[in-house]
């Protein structure tokens, strides 16, 4: 087995074990290698120092993400997916539409979209409840 230092296109770093370099390449091409943090399948090998055998016992290195944190990330991705499926994407009209809903000028419903940091701060100052959603790739399984 060979340990590779890996990274995704979002610059998350983690470790993967493969039987050979060709095995990594084959699994990566088939979309079987994914980032444990964000689920991205755009994975590359990082520069790494060669392993050198030493007589001292090396302390165990923790995995990139323990099972509990991995499950929490899965639940967060599922939550974001549910919110997106049950909300209207109003794009860059988010701040205006949130105000209309808050003031009863538009139908009350869940909306998602983009807002500048100034617009988001202004909405919060006006007492309008908003929350940012993490951005996960759409094709997560």
Image (cartoon, grey):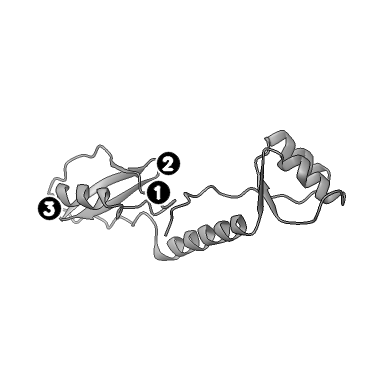
Query: Which part of the image, by quadrant, shows the N terminus?
Result: bottom left
Q: Circle 2 sits on which residue?
A: 10
The nearer-to-camera label among 1 and 3 is 1
- Left or right of 36 on screen, residue 117: right
Pointer 1 and pointer 2: residues touching (CB < 8 Å)? Answer: yes
Query: Which part of the image, by quadrant, shows the C terminus?
Result: bottom left
Q: Position of residue 43 (x, y in %)?
A: 32, 44
Dot 2 falls on a residue whose secondary structure is loop
* 79 w.r.t. 138: above or below: below
Pointer 1 and pointer 3: residues touching (CB < 8 Å)? Answer: no
Where residue 40 is drawn, which disc sits there? 1
- Left or right of 101 on screen, residue 88: left
Q: Circle 3 sits on which residue?
A: 55
Whichever of callouts 1 and 2 sits on the residue coming sooner in the sequence is 2
Q: How many marks?
A: 3
Q: Residue at x 23, y 55 (%)?
A: 17
The nearer-to-camera label among 1 and 2 is 1
Dot 3 falls on a residue whose secondary structure is loop
Q: Residue at x 57, y 56 (%)?
A: 80
Q: Position of residue 53 (x, y in %)?
A: 12, 49
Dot 3: few (<14), some (14–19), or many (≥20) neighbours within 10 Å?
A: few
Give the alpha-carbon distance from disc 2 to disc 3, as whole Å: 37 Å
Dot 1: few (<14), some (14–19), or many (≥20) neighbours within 10 Å?
A: many
Give the alpha-carbon distance from disc 1 to disc 3, as whole Å: 38 Å
Give the alpha-carbon distance from disc 1 to disc 2, as whole Å: 8 Å
* 137 w.r.t. 66: above or below: above
Residue 127 in view, yes or no: no
Whichever of callouts 1 and 3 sits on the residue coming sooner in the sequence is 1
Dot 1 falls on a residue whose secondary structure is loop
């Amino acid at each position: 087995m060979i340990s590779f230092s890996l990274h995704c296109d979002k610059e998350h770093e983690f470790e993967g074990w493969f039987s050979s370099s060709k095995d990594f390449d084959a699994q990566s091409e088939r979309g079987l290698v994914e980032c444990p943090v964000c689920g991205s399948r755009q994975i590359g090998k990082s520069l790494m120092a060669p392993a050198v055998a030493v007589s001292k016992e090396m302390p165990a290195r923790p995995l990139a993400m323990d099972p509990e944190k991995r499950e929490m990330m899965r639940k967060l991705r599922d939550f974001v997916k549910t919110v997106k499926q049950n909300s209207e994407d109003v794009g860059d009209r988010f701040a205006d539409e949130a105000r209309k809903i808050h003031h009863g000028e538009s139908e009350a419903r869940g909306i998602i979209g983009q807002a500048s940091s100034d617009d988001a701060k202004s909405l919060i100052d006006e007492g309008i409840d908003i929350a940012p959603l993490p951005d996960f790739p759409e094709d997560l399984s």
